[in-house]
């Protein structure tokens, strides 16, 4: 009788594990999709701000969506990494225990992943967002050399760099 109960419990834990894994995979997919969309919106908004033709002093506005979406993308990647840790924990431990059963709180793995700022400067994100940042900076320097940008923008640019 006890042997049958143990196999029933293992069967239930296996069902729970499959459901948990499915839920976690959906969250990870959503985070990856958000990250992809963020990159698209970054390029769109940076280009849109560069097309503001009132005067070249508005070029600094392009840094706002760039830095904002860079941070947001890093946040999504940070969340994704925690959920990957949760996924690995469920795969390794669910059949052994019912601890944290259907607990989707991935913050318990906070200490096991890099901080958001560290993720901002990871190879992939820094290559994407850093190259846009560099191109914007080069454009501002070009406009400064050609005196196409007014003195106030120069003061703001020097303050931030």
Image (cartoon, helix red, strand yellow):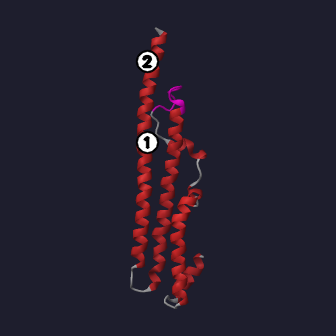
Q: Which residue sits at x=44%, y=34%?
A: 102
Identify whether 55 is placed above or below 42: below
Residue 152 is at least partly visible in this image? no
Residue 121 is at least partly visible in this image? yes
Which residue is situated farthest in the top direction here? Answer: 1
Q: Count residues near mark 2 (Cα–Cα under 10 Å), then give few for <14, some for 14-19, many for 20+.
A: few
Secondary structure category for the residue under label 2 = helix
Q: Is residue 99 magenta?
A: yes
Q: Which residue sits at x=49%, y=11%?
A: 3
Q: Is residue 80 left or right of residue 113?
A: left
Q: Which residue sits at x=54%, y=59%?
A: 124
Q: Which residue sits at x=50%, y=63%?
A: 70
Identify whether 109 is placed above or below 65: above
Secondary structure category for the residue under label 1 = helix
Report the disc number at residue 9: none
What quarter of the picture does the C terminus occupy? bottom right
User: Which residues, given as a range, are shown in magenta?
Assistant: 92-101
Write down the residue under mark 1.
25
Write down the residue under mark 2.
8
Please state the horizontal and vertical placement of residue 121, each as a whole percent of the image. 58, 61
Please state the horizontal and vertical placement of residue 6, each as a whole percent of the image. 48, 16
Report the Cα–Cα distance between label 1 and label 2.
26 Å
Q: Is residue 98 magenta?
A: yes
Identify whether 41 is placed above or below 25: below
Image quadrant where residue 41 sits: bottom left
Which residue is situated farthest in the bottom direction here? Answer: 147
Q: Count residues near mark 1 (Cα–Cα under 10 Å), then give few for <14, some for 14-19, many for 20+.
A: some
Please state the horizontal and vertical placement of residue 85, each as a whole percent of the image. 54, 42
Please state which of residues 65 and 4 is positioned toward the viewer in this rendering. Answer: 4
Upstream in sequence: badge 1 or badge 2 = 2
Please state the horizontal and vertical placement of residue 110, each as a whole percent of the image. 57, 46
Q: Which SS does the magenta portion mostly show? A: loop
């Amino acid at each position: 009788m006890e042997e049958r109960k143990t196999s029933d419990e293992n069967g239930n834990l296996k069902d729970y594990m499959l459901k948990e894994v499915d839920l976690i995979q959906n969250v990870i997919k959503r985070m990856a999709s958000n990250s992809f969309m963020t990159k698209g919106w970054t390029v769109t908004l940076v280009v849109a701000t560069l097309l503001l033709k009132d005067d070249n002093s508005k070029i600094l506005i392009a840094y706002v969506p760039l830095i904002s979406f860079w941070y947001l993308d890093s946040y999504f990647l940070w969340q994704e990494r925690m959920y990957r840790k949760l996924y690995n924990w469920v795969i390794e431990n669910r059949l052994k225990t019912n601890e944290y059963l259907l607990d989707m709180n991935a913050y318990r793995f906070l200490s096991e992943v890099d901080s958001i700022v560290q993720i901002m400067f990871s190879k992939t994100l820094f290559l994407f967002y850093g190259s846009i940042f560099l191109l914007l900076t080069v454009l501002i320097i070009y406009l400064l050399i050609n005196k196409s940008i007014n003195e106030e923008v120069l003061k703001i640019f020097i303050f931030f760099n």
